């Protein structure tokens, strides 16, 4: 299932696994199960820390497999043969279950741990979907951190009857406890904002405590990022308020007209923009939609959440 180059790369990644990982496969006699078994056997052969076990663990969907630790019941499952764009999701799940720390702030990890209630997520994907991996990886991380969260990635091509019955027309489509939760690209912070009932009030309290800015940029796309960088370079108090940092670039699959960069993808460019802005003292206020501007000695920007920000100067981008 894996060519020699991919095997070499995966073996190098698996050297970062520091805790035993158990892959529990629930298979049948079909061709898809045969292919899944072959893939999982190849993966297990690349690291002494990874063990493959075949047993019926009551899986709703076959073929499927869980990634867990021996003696634990981590809620990460793939009802898919995760190659294509989802291969990265598989690798990250193996690494993170195996003890490699995720690139997420301690604040976000603590927010995941404190989520109350039981969350059973199912994400329907296709292996050619470029917006699916971020959703899958975010929900897998949540399932790893919080034992009350479970996440199953389902390849629609393997379970077409189910996709037809649920009338799923686009990927990724995320179901939560049997109800549609969302469609399309979603970042971890967006998912948390939807499931954490106290997140909005905590965010509003933080915003209310902020002092007035010298420059407040409304919009987190390339123009907003550039404005923030140039303002912050002057040493003045700068903030960015945006519904999604990266803006519409996040939904752009291929970018080939950005001078000096032959080709890139929208999410990669958005990540680079955010990294650049964070090199300066810029206060990024993400997941907040600006709805109104009120002129005055200090300009007030009213947000959809009910909170507001003030600044001497506002740049609309």
Image (cartoon, grey):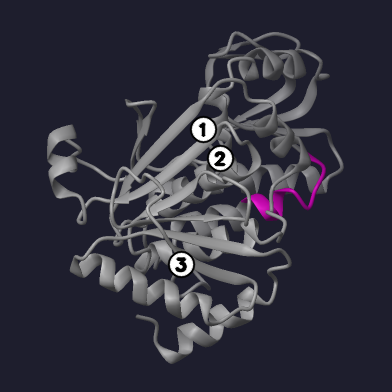
Percent across and percent down for residue 82 are 38, 63
Which residue is the extreme one toward the bottom? 4
Crowding around mark 2 (Cα neighbors within 10 Å: few <14, some 14 to 19, many 20+) is some
Judged from the image, the secondary structure of the residue bearing numbered disc 1 is: helix
Determine the CA span between mark 2 and mark 3. Answer: 22 Å
Name the residue: 78% across, 53% down: 279
- Magenta span includes 311: no
Percent across and percent down for residue 197 are 58, 15
Name the residue: 44% across, 50% down: 77
Counting residues from the N terminus, which is met first, the one under dot 3 or under dot 1?
Answer: 1
Residue 131 seen: no
Counting residues from the N terminus, which is met first, the one under dot 2 or under dot 3?
Answer: 2
The residue wearing badge 1 is: 191
Left or right relative to 18: residue 1: left
Which residue is the extreme one toward the right? 235
Percent across and percent down for residue 2 are 39, 82
Judged from the image, the secondary structure of the residue bearing numbered disc 3 is: loop
Determine the CA span between mark 3 and mark 1. Answer: 25 Å
Name the residue: 63% across, 36% down: 146
Left or right relative to 160: residue 283: right
Name the residue: 38% across, 51% down: 132
Left or right relative to 81: residue 276: right
Q: Quadrant of the N terminus?
A: bottom left
The residue wearing badge 2 is: 188
Are dots 3 and 1 in contact, CB under 8 Å? Answer: no
Are dots 1 and 2 in contact, CB under 8 Å? Answer: yes
- Quarter-of-image position of residue 297: top right
**195 versus 104 height, above or below:** above
The residue wearing badge 3 is: 264
């Amino acid at each position: 299932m894996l060519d020699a180059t991919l095997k070499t790369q995966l073996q190098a990644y698996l050297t970062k696994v520091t805790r035993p990982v158990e892959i529990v496969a629930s298979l049948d006699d079909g061709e898809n199960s045969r292919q899944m078994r072959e893939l999982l056997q190849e993966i297990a052969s690349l690291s002494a820390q990874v063990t493959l076990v075949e047993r019926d663990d009551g899986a709703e969907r076959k073929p499927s497999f869980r990634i867990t630790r021996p003696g634990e019941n981590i809620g990460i499952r793939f009802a898919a043969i995760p190659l294509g764009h989802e291969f990265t999701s598989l690798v990250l799940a193996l690494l993170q279950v195996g003890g490699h720390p995720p690139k997420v702030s301690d604040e976000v990890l603590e927010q995941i741990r404190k989520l109350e209630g039981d969350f059973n997520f199912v994400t329907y994907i296709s292996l050619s979907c470029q917006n699916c991996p971020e959703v899958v990886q975010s929900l897998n991380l949540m399932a790893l951190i919080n034992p009350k969260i479970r996440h199953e990635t389902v390849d629609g091509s393997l379970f077409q009857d189910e996709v037809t019955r649920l009338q799923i027309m686009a990927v990724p489509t995320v179901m939560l406890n049997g109800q549609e939760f969302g469609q399309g690209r979603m970042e971890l912070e967006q998912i948390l904002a939807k499931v954490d009932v106290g997140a909005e009030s905590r965010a509003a309290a933080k915003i209310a405590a902020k002092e007035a800015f010298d420059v407040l940029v409304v919009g987190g796309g390339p123009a907003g990022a550039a404005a923030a960088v140039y303002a912050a370079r002057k040493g003045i108090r700068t903030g960015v308020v945006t519904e999604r940092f990266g803006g519409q670039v996040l939904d752009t699959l291929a970018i080939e007209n950005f001078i000096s960069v032959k080709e890139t993808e929208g999410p990669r460019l958005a990540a680079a923009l955010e990294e650049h802005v964070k090199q300066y003292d810029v206060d990024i206020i993400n997941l907040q939609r600006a709805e109104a501007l009120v002129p005055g000695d200090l300009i007030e920007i009213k947000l959809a959440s009910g909170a507001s920000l003030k600044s001497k100067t506002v740049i609309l981008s």
